[in-house]
Image (spheres, rainbow, N blue to C red):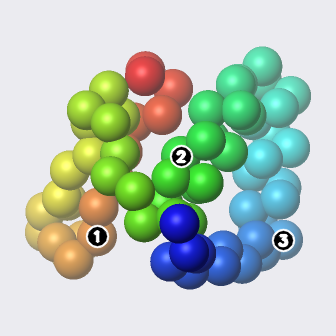
Amino acid sequence: MQDFFTPIFTNQFRRDMERMRKHGKNIAKLKAVIELLRTQELLPEKYKNHKLVGNFAKQRECHIQSA
């Protein structure tokens, strides 16, 4: 499938990734979700993809660690 978007990894994102790695988080799960989003595939139900409310109503969120 063609790329839906090309992610731009900021310095803040890189620092957050390093912090996650140091805390023993599973980085492979995050990379898998990024790849699904990059190719515009639907996220499986296990990621609990949902809309946010209030000031973030135009945003979406998913739960990677609990999946």
Above or below residue 46? Residue 6 is: below
Measured as percent of width and height from the top left, residue 33 is found at: 53, 46
Q: Earlier in the sequence, mark 3 or mark 2?
A: 3
From the viewer's perspective, tell me whether residue 22 is left or right of residue 2: right
Measured as percent of width and height from the top left, residue 5 is found at: 56, 80
Mark 2 is surrounded, within 10 Å at the Cα level, by few (under 14), some (14 to 19) or many (20 or more) other residues, namely some
Q: Nearer the viewer, residue 2 or 10?
A: 2
Cα separation between marks 3 and 1: 22 Å
In the drawing, what numbered circle is on residue 11? 3
Above or below residue 48? Residue 34 is: below
Q: Earlier in the sequence, mark 1 or mark 2?
A: 2
x 29%, y 61%: residue: 60
Residue position marked by numbered label 2 in the rendering: 33
Q: Secondary structure at mark 2?
A: helix
Query: Are the residues at dot 3 and dot 1 in contact (C-beta closer than 8 Å)?
Result: no
**3 or 2: mark nearer the eye:** 2
x 51%, y 53%: residue: 36
Cα separation between marks 3 and 2: 20 Å
Amino acid type assigned to the residue bearing label 1 in the image: Gln
From the viewer's perspective, tell me whether residue 36 is left or right of residue 22: left
Amino acid type assigned to the residue bearing label 3 in the image: Asn
Residue position marked by numbered label 1 in the rendering: 59
